[in-house]
Image: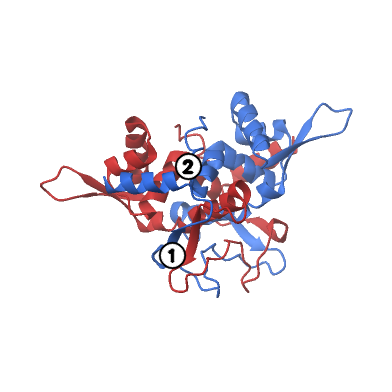
Chain colours: A red, B blue
Amino acid sequence: MTRTSLEKHSCSLARSVDVLGDKWTLMLIRDAFYGVSTFSQFKARLGVAPTVLVERLGLLCEHGVFERVQGRPDVDRFHYKLTDKGRDLFPILIGFMQWGDKWIFGKGQEPIRILDKATRSPVQPIAVQARDGHVVDFREVTFEVGPGMDDAYIQRLRTKSAS
Amino acid sequence: MTRTSLEKHSCSLARSVDVLGDKWTLMLIRDAFYGVSTFSQFKARLGVAPTVLVERLGLLCEHGVFERVQGRPDVDRFHYKLTDKGRDLFPILIGFMQWGDKWIFGKGQEPIRILDKATRSPVQPIAVQARDGHVVDFREVTFEVGPGMDDAYIQRLRTKSAS
């Protein structure tokens, strides 16, 4: 997995997917939410090659999505735990689950139901909401240059997309 | 990009990221939301190798996220358009943008602002919400075997994660 290609993009989506846009990375984050934490557990659940697993866990730690914590001192075993930065990915993972439920398995064929513990009711589909809470679709949203934009980047995009 | 590895998972997240868990795939979907539609535009904006671009666009069409439509008959050029299935990824893409805004660029350094067109106010951060609308975090959510679960799969996961 090369990671340098998107690092110069002045776009949060590009920079996020540069770190997270990999199926094994996303599966590791999924399993971390399920409470999986050791190398051998991740390996057994995902059936992923050890070299791939070492690299992905390393990247997740390097980017502060996971932290590596020492387990019991008498056991040579680390635990990989989600940081706050990692836990903040929860809505995105739920979004992927809901998308697969709807478009891959189909309504009524969900392999896993996502419930609010308190009421046992399904959670709502994730959605983009305006300040007053109403759901907006992509046609109702606009993008504007923000304070962190690199001017050269936006210029380059404008030129390129006009070509 | 191998795609067979996660195809047997009875998990919507696994199946979704098997299709979407790739940085170029997610960047192509981003650009499609920005209105980019031709091979040469995607190539110029992303600087991605043509072979990679051909493969990713092919996969997106195969999985029904993009559809390939013929442009003007006198121009040998196809347009790649988001389908309903593709447009339904909008909240996930916004989620990646917001995560990068918060954790990579940092508050006040967002390169791009995401606004509700009607009010020019920023949209809300995507979140998982219970039926009554209150935001729930991962500790308040539980997963339950659903109607489409393959029993062998859940058994395997249980065995593996206990090991």
Comparing B122 with B135, the one in front is B135
Q: Quadrant of the C terminus of chain A?
A: top right
Q: Quadrant of the N terminus of chain A?
A: top left
The extreme left residue here reads: A74
User: Quick one: label 2, few (<14), some, or many (20+) residues within 10 Å?
Assistant: some
- Which residue corresponds to mark 1? B141
Would you say residue A129 is visible in this rendering? Answer: yes
The extreme top residue here reads: B51
Tell me the chain of label 2.
B
- Which residue corresponds to mark 2? B9
Residue type marked 2: His
Secondary structure under tag 1 reads: strand
Residue type marked 1: Val
Nearest-to-viewer mark from 1 and 2: 2
All told, the count of numbered labels is 2
The extreme front residue here reads: B151
Give percent across and percent down for residue A147.
56, 57
Instruction: Please report the residue visible at 71 percent of the width from the left and 61 percent of the height from the top.
Output: A140
Comparing B95 with B85, the one in front is B85
- First in residue order: circle 1 vs circle 2: 2
Say whether residue A20 is left or right of residue B112.
left
The span from disc 1 to disc 2 (Cα, nearest Å) is 21 Å
Would you say residue A148 is visible in this rendering? Answer: no
Instruction: Please report the residue visible at 59 percent of the width from the left and 27 percent of the height from the top.
Output: B52
Say whether residue B70 is left or right of residue B92.
right
Say whether residue A83 is left or right of residue A152.
left
Comparing A29 with A120, the one in front is A120
Comparing A72 with A146, the one in front is A72
Secondary structure under tag 2 reads: loop
